[in-house]
Amino acid sequence: MKRIFFVILIVAFLFTSVYSEVNFKGLVQNWFSISSQMNGDTSDSIYGFSNKRIRFAPYGTLGRKIRWGVQFAFDKFATPSVLDVYMEYFFSREAMLKFGKFAPPGAKGAALTSSGGLDLIERSSIIQLWGGNSGLQGLRAFGAQLSGKLMEGKIYYALMLSNALTARNNWMPSVKRLSTPNSSNGMGMWGRIEAYPVPGLQIGGFLGSGSEVDPAIVDSDVKRNSFGANIIYKKNNINLKFEYIGGKTNGIKYSGMYVVAGYRFNKLEPVIGFESFTPIFEGEKYTNMSGGINYFHSKSVKIQLNYVMRSEDITSIDNDIIYANFQYSFNSKKK
């Protein structure tokens, strides 16, 4: 609560600045789901409604060189939190410095893609697996990032140095205390590059590496490494996405991929998806096949319906899922 109050004070200060442009954006996602869950030798149906995500994000500028943003999250089964709080300084088109808490330049299908802009209702399983193995909280990290566009906008790069990946925002020592609540020590590094060779086509990749240690615990070293590549083609009514991710956490490897394809007919967009992932190297392989339809009622209202067929190559269980999502989003900035 103290942190949230502190952030609110910062935002209030920005509101009162005569040089500040202030806007608001956010979304609400209401879900209905039906799934099967194994209970011993029997399968039970689980169904119900929920407010999956509620987001509120003030953002704005301070003059021509500085941009800031804050995002509050009120998600199902999660404590209300501050997902993002950052400031950006524009040196030029080729170099921008960003400081605070935000999505690292890693997997494209993670927080670099807005929850409101997902083609299928849920992020792919490999994205969630990557976030957990990378020690990210809400697919975010604390740190500083240098990014920019080169070759007349055809190349984008981003380099980020972050805290020990599981460290909290009170990671730094305090003059008032001889010890800190979080004793983890270490750093994480991220790098991402994207190319836009022709209109509508994006080819990208990333590398992530980090290590941390708790001085109070013997042999507590944690090493995290990951990499990935993606191809996106989105032009006119065509929507195609592919991403592969691999990684290693403390010597344990994992990998996976997903592909999504959609074609929009006016306000309707049929979508299909396929993903496979192996949570432990040479372990059981999981695959999900998804089919659904997106209905864009307006710029603010989107309705989604998905059916997900889940399978396991060793121990198959009855665990398919039907999702429905009613989404309302808003942005006060007039484009």
Image: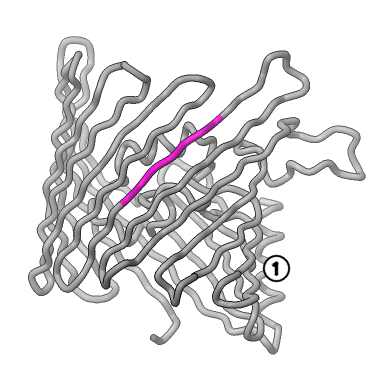
Spot the residue most to the front: 151
Spot the residue most to the left: 265
Locate residue 1, reporting x and y percent. Answer: 66, 51
Query: Residue 245 appears in which quarter of the rendering?
Result: top left
Q: Decide if residue 298 is on the left or right side of residue 67.
A: left
Spot the residue most to the top: 41
What span is in magenta? 224-230
State the residue in front, 8 or 21.
21
Which scheme is used to colour this image of the protein?
one colour
Q: Tell me what residue is drawn at x 42 percent, y 23 percent.
A: 253
Q: Tell me what residue is drawn at x 15 percent, y 52 percent.
A: 305
Query: Residue 128 appears in which quarter of the rendering?
Result: top left
Instruction: Identify the residue under disc 1.
Output: 10
Q: Quadrant of the C terminus?
A: bottom left
Q: Is residue 226 magenta?
A: yes
* Relative vertical location of residue 44 with respect to residue 96 in this rendering, above or below: above
Q: How would you classify the magenta stretch by its main secondary structure?
A: strand
Residue type, mark 1 in image: Ile
Locate residue 139, reporting x and y percent. Answer: 48, 46
Locate residue 262, reporting x and y percent. Answer: 14, 58
Locate residue 187, reporting x and y percent. Answer: 67, 39
